[in-house]
Image: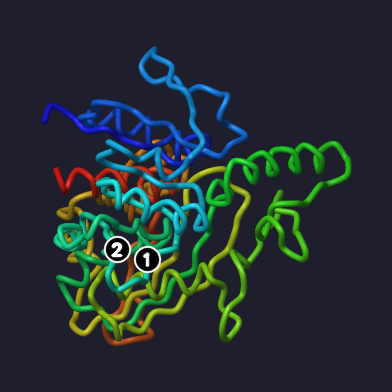
Amino acid sequence: MSGFNVAIVGVTGMVGQAFIRVLLERNFPVKGWKMLASARSADKKVEVGGRYYPIEEAQPASFAGVDFAFFSAGGEISEALAPEAVKRGAVVVDNSSAFRMDPQVPLVVPEVNPEAAHRHQGLIANPNCSTIQMVVALQPLHLAAGLKRVVVATYQSVSGAGKEAVDELTAQSEAVLTGKEVVKERIPYKGAARHHQIAFNMVPHIDVFEEDDYTKEEMKMIRETRKIMGLPELPVTSTTVRVPVFNGHCEAVNVEFNNPLTPQQARQALAGFPGVVVMDDPAEFLYPMPIHTEGRDEVFVGRIRCDRSVPYGLNMWVVADNIRKGAATNSIQIAELLI
C-alpha cells in the first residue's frame, strides 16, 4: 500500500487543524483526506498543501474506505461515530474521554506503553493532555527507582478548553485593560451554572465536579495514569487549575519513590528517554515555560530537586504543548506505531 486514507473528525477545531499540520510535518503516508465536522461547517473547505478539500458532515457512511480516523469532536460524537468507523474498517484514534477507561480499549502514550496499541480492536484512546505529559516524565523515573506516590498540581492553558476559550481570554484581557465589561461564558466550562473571569485570574476548576469534590479532569489524571503505566494501585492525587495562558500546560509534580534517586540521576534518566527535553539550570535561570514548548512535540522537564520531607522524593516542573503532544501529535504517533 502506497498510503492511507485519513479522516479527521472535528477538522475545524484547534486539535483538528493540528492533526493536519502534524501529519504533514511527520510525512505520514496520506493517500486521501476526508475532512469531517458538524453540519454547520459542511459548506466550508480545508486547505492542505495548496489543495482544497470540502468539509463533509460526519456520518456513519463517511468512513467507507477510511484507514485511519482521528477524532476530536467531543465524547458524544465519538460514542456515536467511532464504532461506526470501526465497523467500516477504520482504525480510530479518539481524543475524547468516551472510551479511555474501557478495559477493551488501549489507552496509549507511545513513549510509555507502545505495546498496548497493538492490542486494539479497531479503537484506541488518546489520553487526557495533562496526563500524557506527566506520564512521559514519570516513566523513566519509575524505571529507575519505582514510583510509590505521585502528587500533581496543573497550570493548564485556555487552549485546553477550545478556540472559544482562547478568544474569550483575548476579549477579557482587552476589556479589563480598557475598563469595559468582562463577558464570561467559557470558564470553567461551557454551560456551567456559573462562569468566572480567566483574564488576570486563575480558576481551580476544570470540568464538572465528581466524587469527594474532585473534578472530572483531576480524576482523569488519576485513573489514566494508573492504566497507562500499568500500576492500578499507584497512589495519585491531583489539583487542576486553569490559568490565563493561551497555549501550553504546566505541572508541578511531586514524586515519592521506592528506592533512592538523586536529582542528577533523575536528569540523566529523563535526558535519555524518548520525547523528553531536560531544561534545568537554576544558576542560569533556565527552566521550561510555555513559550519554550509552543509548536514542539517534546515534554520539557526542569526544577528537578529533592523533596526532603520523605526518604526518597523529588519535585519537578513539567511543560508541554497541550494541542500537539497533548492531543494531535500523540494520536499520530499511535498511528505510526501501527504502520
The three-letter code of the residue at mark 1 reads: Arg
Residue 185 location, x and y as percent?
75, 51
- Res. 216 mark: none
Taking the image as shown, residue 287 lies to the left or right of residue 104, namely right
Task: Specify few, some or many for label 1: CA neighbours under 10 Å numbering under 14, 14-19, or 20 or more.
Answer: many
Q: Secondary structure at mark 2?
A: loop
Q: Which residue, given by chain and number where applicable, does mark 1 sit on? A: 100
Q: CA distance from mark 2 to mark 1?
A: 6 Å
Q: Quadrant of residue 7?
A: top left
Is 188 or 23 nearer to us in this picture? 23
Q: Which residue, given by chain and number where applicable, does mark 2 sit on? A: 107
Q: Residue at x 44, y 65 (%)?
A: 252
- Position of residue 50 relative to residue 31, above or below, is above
Taking the image as shown, residue 24 lies to the left or right of residue 239, namely left
The three-letter code of the residue at mark 2 reads: Leu
Q: Residue furthest front?
A: 61
Q: Are marks 2 and 1 in contact (CB under 8 Å)?
A: yes
Is 165 or 263 nearer to us in this picture? 165
